[in-house]
Amino acid sequence: MRGSGPVLETINPANGEVHAAIGTPSSAEVEAICSDVSHSSALRSWQSMLPHQRAAVLHRIADGLVAGAEPMARAQMLENGKTLKECRAQAASAAGVFRYYAGVCETMESTMPPPRGNWLGLTTHEPYGLIAAITPWNSPLTMESQKVAPALAAGNAVVLKPSEVTTLPALELARICEEAGLPKGLLSVLPGYGTEVGPALIGHPDVRMVTFTGGTETGRRIGEQCARRLIPVALELGGKSPHILFEDADIPTACEGIIDGIFEGLGQSCIAGSRLFVHRSRMEEVLERLTEMTEKLRVGLPTDPNVDFGSLSSHQHRARVEQYVTLAREEGATVLVGGSRPTDPALAAGAFYLPTILTGLSNRSRVCQEEIFGPVLCVLPFDDEADLIDQANGTAFGLACGIWTADYRRGLKVARAIAAGTVWINTYKKLSIAAPFGGYKDSGLGREKGLAGMRLYQQTKSILLATE
Ligand code: NDP
């Protein structure tokens, strides 16, 4: 778009070069775009379409995403440095999200509450109208489809503000939606800086609901702005998820899950299992195995099919990760592996960083309490279950948890005691668009995905009809 706000340059983090220059809207343009969409005939006719007609459009978008998967995947790779392999998988799953919500849109029913008199009750679910969606840079293909598909399915228009780091996947998504026959304006993308475009968007009187994924402090500010406006907000925020290994666990399988759980996407994942609690009796062998596995992980150019990880999403973010590793050393940590940039000269211009394992920290240290959002695993010992649960829950966050044990009764008991929105037992990071997802405590408000993910974008109305 050609807005009159500042020009946004996106940088390829794998080589530090400017990848694209994108116009951004001024506050007045944000105001005009939101007003136009919310009063458009396109929105009125979208809302009056029957659910199966809206579903047909969503299926066509899914087809468009399959056909356009490669440019989508490359757009994300060039902006956030993830491997092409991972970006391709995320593009494929974005198509699946649109198909899932096409199905939900067509099949979800209203209900009839039991009458308490001579009347019939109908509980129906109606769209809000205009939804503001704000997304982060780590997995835009995933985050944006998870918001846009259910919000459209529910009969809304969406104004999407992607991260300033990753604008192109959102623009590609909007193009595919339009080509698939989504009426013009029902998905508008506003590139720009969060602190400028964000408040103008959320403050617009026609925006009736906000859905946000990002950091906890940004989420708190957005929540405050929505509270003043008395509009609902869904917040998917940060995490510092505990990964637990009991003494009876299958150690080789658990270590595979632990390595994927923290290092996939170089730890730039809200559900990264960044605090590992190991029963003291198995600590030595677990550390030895994890170190050996981590040393074999390959960091390299995102286009190289033989590497496990690309670069971090930006040089600025790498500096933040490095500050945490410096802080860890000051807090008394031992760096078992990693803790530095790769030495390969071919990677010198990019924001690369090696997967890192730390020991010797207390659960109360800053490094174990604050979200690093990078490839840094802190390993801590525990002695008994009560001590473990205290430590695992001893954080402001509550997004996810992994438990490895041969004893399912114990697994379930601990799962119930952990304050987190998602708990895995003998696996980690398995996600399904059909399973509700969200955080406890400072990890968020509301649930995306699943049937709940569609209701998130609707308001409930009771209609009562006299029968006598
Ligand atoms: P930020 O919170 O910095 O930014 C997220 C989005 O909010 C960006 O689009 C940003 O724009 C925008 N923004 C910033 N300030 C404001 C404001 N005042 N008003 C409105 N919008 C604003 O997060 P990051 O992009 O750095 O992403 C990393 C964070 O996302 C991590 O904490 C991670 O845990 C969390 N996350 C949570 C997930 C979950 O499902 N729970 C999933 C993935 C990530 P700009 O880019 O221009 O600053």
Image (cartoon, rainbow, N blue to C red):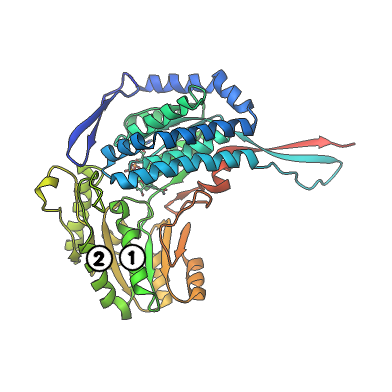
**Which residue is at a point 47% across and 51% down the rendered structure image?**
438
According to the image, label 1 marks what residue? 256
Closer to the camera, 233 or 317?
A: 317
440 is higher (above) or lower (below) than 31 = below
Mark 1 CB in 8 Å range of ligand 1? no
From the top left corner, tell me how far across and down residue 118 is, in percent: 87, 41
**Which residue is at a point 37% across and 40% down the rendered structure image?**
140
According to the image, label 2 marks what residue? 293
Q: Quadrant of residue 139?
A: top left
6 is higher (above) or lower (below) than 90 = above
| Extreme residue in the right direction | 468
- Residue type, numbered disc 1: Glu
Residue 213 visible: no
Rounded to the nearest whole Å, what is the CA distance between mark 2 and mark 1?
Answer: 8 Å
Q: Which of the two discs, 2 and 1, labels the residue nearer the N terminus?
A: 1
Q: Quadrant of the C terminus?
A: top right
Question: Does residue 182 appear to the left or right of 337 in the view shown?
Answer: right
Q: Residues within 10 Å of mark 1 (few under 14, many from 20)?
A: some
Question: Does residue 87 appear to the left or right of 458 in the view shown?
Answer: left
Q: Secondary structure at mark 1?
A: helix
